[in-house]
Image: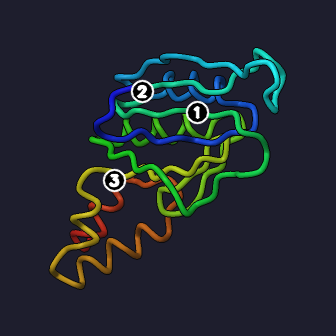
Amino acid sequence: MATDGFTTCLWFDDQAEEAAHFYVSVFKNSAVGRVTRYPEGAPRPEGTVLTVEFTANGQKFVALNGGPEFTFDEAISFQVFCADQDEVDHYWTRLTANGGEPGPCGWLKDRFGVSWQIIPEGMIDMIGDPDPIRAARTTRAMLSMGKLDIAALTKAHAGE
């Protein structure tokens, strides 16, 4: 790996390789890279996957099989900005599949417990509108949703 920039390390119990392949299947501009394995005498059986380097949506990650000591929570999440409702629907469906959990306001957890925010482009501008009435309408609409609905957010922002 290059010494410039940074790479996000995701700690899994024993699903690092499965997770890397899953994320690569969900996002464009993605690929699985080097896989390292535990050597003899390590805390896991020799040959067990230790790390999997991968790129998802152009971002570098390392998935680590570190054991059950640490788990994911909502304190860290990945934001996915979507150009249209089809993209929102795609990421929401793919990331909640097979045991993922939908949450409020565009948040969800995938089947590995990683938190994601699926956000339509323009939504941040609508809830941050300098007009407090428009911002409040949009925010109230967002707070009532699980998966975000661009048409409904746009109507709320416009006062329709």
Q: Is residue 5 left or right of residue 75?
A: left
Question: Looking at the image, which residue sits at the far front?
Answer: 41
Mark 3 or mark 2: whose residue is earlier in sequence: 2
Disc ID at residue 150 = 3
Quarter of image, res 122: bottom left
Whether residues under marks 3 and 2 lie with C-beta atoms below 8 angstroms apart, the answer is: no
The amino acid beneath tag 1 is: Ala
Dot 3 lies on which element? helix
Report the side of 33 relative to 57 (left or right).
right
Give the CA distance from mark 1 to mark 3: 33 Å
Where the N terminus falls, by quadrant?
top left
Q: Would residue 38 appear left or right of 35 to someone viewing this image?
A: right
Viewer-proximal residue, 56 or 47?
47
Farthest residue to the bottom: give it: 132
The residue located at (34%, 22%) in the rendering is 29
Q: Is residue 117 above or below residue 11?
A: below
For disc 2, the marked residue is: 55
Asked if the residue at tag 3 contacts the one at tag 1, i.e. Cβ–Cβ closer than 8 Å, the answer is no
- The numbered disc on residue 63 is 1
Amino acid found under the numbered disc labelled 2: Thr
In the rendering, at what x and y percent does residue 135 appear?
Answer: 26, 77
